[in-house]
Amino acid sequence: MDWILQALTVFDRWLWGNWLLFVLLGVGGWYTLISGGVQIWHFGEILKKTLWDPIRQKTRGKGAEGTISSFQALCTAVASCVGSGNIVGVSTAVLAGGMGALFWMWVAAFLGMATKYGEIVLGILYREKDETGNYVGGPMYYIEKGLRAPWLAGLCAGFMVIQIIGGNLIQSNTISGLMRECFQFPLWVTGGILVAMIFLVSAGGLKGLAKVSQKVVPFMAVLYVAGGLVILLVNITRIPGVIQDIFVGAFGLRAAAGGAIGSMVTAMEKGIARGLYSNEAGEGSAPVIHSAAKVNHPVEQGIMGVAEVFVDTFLLCTITGLVLGVTGMADSSTAGYILVAEAFASVWKPLGYVVSFSLILFCVTTLMSQWYFGYVGLNYLKGKGLAEKFKYVFPLFCMVGALLEIELVWTIQDIALGLLTIPNLCALIYLWPEVKRATEEYFGRNKGITS
């Protein structure tokens, strides 16, 4: 078993090496160009559609076809990508790459906004109805129809199912460990609670998941951001110094002459890897959920992908990084979520529990949305019958994940995700003219389509 793990680990490191990270960045740069800098010049409209319209309860996509509302799709997608990485991953990146890693995280997120915009537009363009009349989409659909490669689309769907089962085991394992450490819950009790909770969510279908996400996601985001802002306000005089550390550290300017390049490269590697892994741009997950949205035009939902990355990285990950900086914890030897909890607790001890509770919420919301990816993958491969059965089998993996050691699962899940990402990137590279055409149509002739 050890040699299998070692072999898979070597392949995993190659697969997620710098070459893939820079391909992801390159695709993001290209989509920034062909979309006319959608994440810059249309950010005001993005804020309006994601914040102001839902507050006014303005009906969007009236008369449009879809399964869930545009805002519900956004909340569900945020639920799926916001997880332990926003707390644990950021602290790991900062410890390894210094505060400069945060700058490169922002760079990855900025370019990732355009990538996610592009894959969601393609998801809407190539979506179709399933046997029950609900809309389904994702990389397997635009790979089959756009690349005309059904065999590659089938592999993509298979990797998605494998990756999602692995994700279930990992999130369940993380949650059960936290519950035991923070509240002394036995592992099997947490596993049982998760099985029941995820069963109730998955049994309600996508519409039930969307309704839960619409209520939980804004709450958990506000809770974590509010707790972080308290820390930043108490340490407001240290913020300018931390900002300086971020930019200086990003380019290794404080390192000795011989180590400046090495310091910069480390900050770049850790920051970019964490940014891309956290916001999931280019991995093919976002269009699966967003393809079900009720919209009049693909671009209308594509800009929701920009908002998704903004919430994940520029908001939640940035709060984590800045808190570590102003509290001086960025130089600590402590690792993981404990480091962030200690940073919060350094101002007021109960705030440390905000981190624990937020981390549990982040993992639970990721877990509750994961069944849908497996459902869509199996629906594509074998039809509705097997996909419906998966909805009721998926929660049982929560108990397995809660009780077992899953080091091998981490590696297999990473490999499956990488093998899913590569064909998705191929489709993005080949089908960019369609995204460009849709973008010009929406922001040109049909700019007022949703007004």
Image: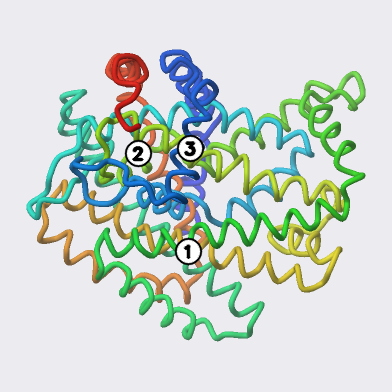
Q: Which residue is mark 2?
A: 420
Q: Nearer the viewer, mark 2 or mark 3?
A: 3
Amino acid on which disc 1 is placed: Val
Q: Earlier in the sequence, mark 1 or mark 2?
A: 1
For the point 15% across and 32% down, which residue is it? 150
Q: Which residue is mark 3?
A: 48
Q: Nearer the viewer, residue 207 or 199?
A: 207
Amino acid on which disc 2 is placed: Leu
Q: Looking at the rendering, in which quadrant would you find the C terminus? A: top left
Residue 216, numbered circle: 1
Q: Nearer the viewer, residue 296 or 301?
A: 296
**How many C-alpha atoms fall within 10 Å of the one at disc 3: few (<14), some, or many (≥20)?**
few
Q: What colouring method underlies this structural image?
A: rainbow
Q: Looking at the rendering, in which quadrant would you find the N terminus? A: bottom left
Left/right placement of residue 234 relative to residue 135 reads right
The spot of residue 40 in percent (x, y) is 55, 23
Q: Is residue 417 above or below residue 144?
A: below
* Secondary element at image label 3: helix
Q: CA distance from mark 2 to mark 3?
A: 33 Å
The spot of residue 19 in percent (x, y) is 52, 25
